[in-house]
Amino acid sequence: MTAVSGRAARRGPGLLRIAALRWLAAELIPFGCLVGGLALAREVRPAAAAGYILALFAGTPLTIFYLYKVLGSAAAWVWAIAPLMIGSTVIGGILFGNSEVHTSQHPSGTRVVVTGTWWIVVAALAVVLALAVAGAIANGERWIARHAGNLPRTKFEKYARSRGTLARLWLTR
């Protein structure tokens, strides 16, 4: 094996070494799951429950996993991101999915009149969710910068913490 082929065989950091792409991936995970789940709930009525589960119970864990393992953000960001995902799923489900609400006063359901206030609320939730994810990203990048020398560079190296262990996907050698 020559030196050139040895270097070519080793995998280096991929597209995630570009900071903008790391940020874009982190922002697209929760919104992608939210849009995909709500679209499934709207277009395929029998699969509406699966759509809401995708929007809520896939988006939040995938976002936290990416932020914690790949970017090194603190796990406590789940307390900021989870309520925003719940609110976005509920309000988005009313706006884009089924706008019927069942209560004890109206067990057969009553239609919700969607006004401009609903759109303002969903836009505000989306902006706050994007800002929370951006804050988590900045937190992770500061943590990785402080601990970059202690992180494992290969998947076989031992590491005492699980935070940021997949940072080898984007850290340079």
Image (cartoon, helix red, strand yellow):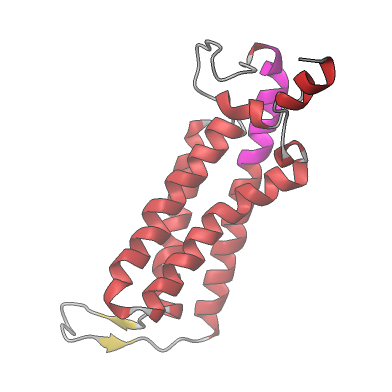
The part of the image, by quadrant, that contains residue 46 is bottom left
Find the residue positioned furthest to the right: 4
Res. 173 in view: no
Residue in view at x 78 percent, y 22 percent = 5
Name the magenta segment's main secondary structure: helix
Q: Nearer the viewer, residue 128 or 168?
A: 168
Question: At which x and y percent is residue 101?
Answer: 28, 80
How many marks are shown on the rendered structure? 0
Question: At which x and y percent is residue 51?
Answer: 37, 66
Please identify the quadrant where the N terminus is shown: top right
Q: Nearer the viewer, residue 68 or 153?
A: 153
140 magenta-colored: yes
Please identify the quadrant where the C terminus is shown: top right
Find the residue positioned furthest to the front: 1
Residue in view at x 61 percent, y 16 percent = 152
Q: Nearer the viewer, residue 140 or 167?
A: 167
Q: Nearer the viewer, residue 137 or 42?
A: 42
Res. 44 in view: yes
Question: At which x and y percent is residue 157?
Answer: 56, 12
Question: At which x and y percent is residue 71?
Answer: 62, 33
The part of the image, by quadrant, that contains residue 86 is bottom left
Residue in view at x 55 percent, y 20 percent = 155
Q: Which residues are magenta?
A: 136-149
167 magenta-colored: no
Q: Is residue 72 left or right of residue 146?
A: left
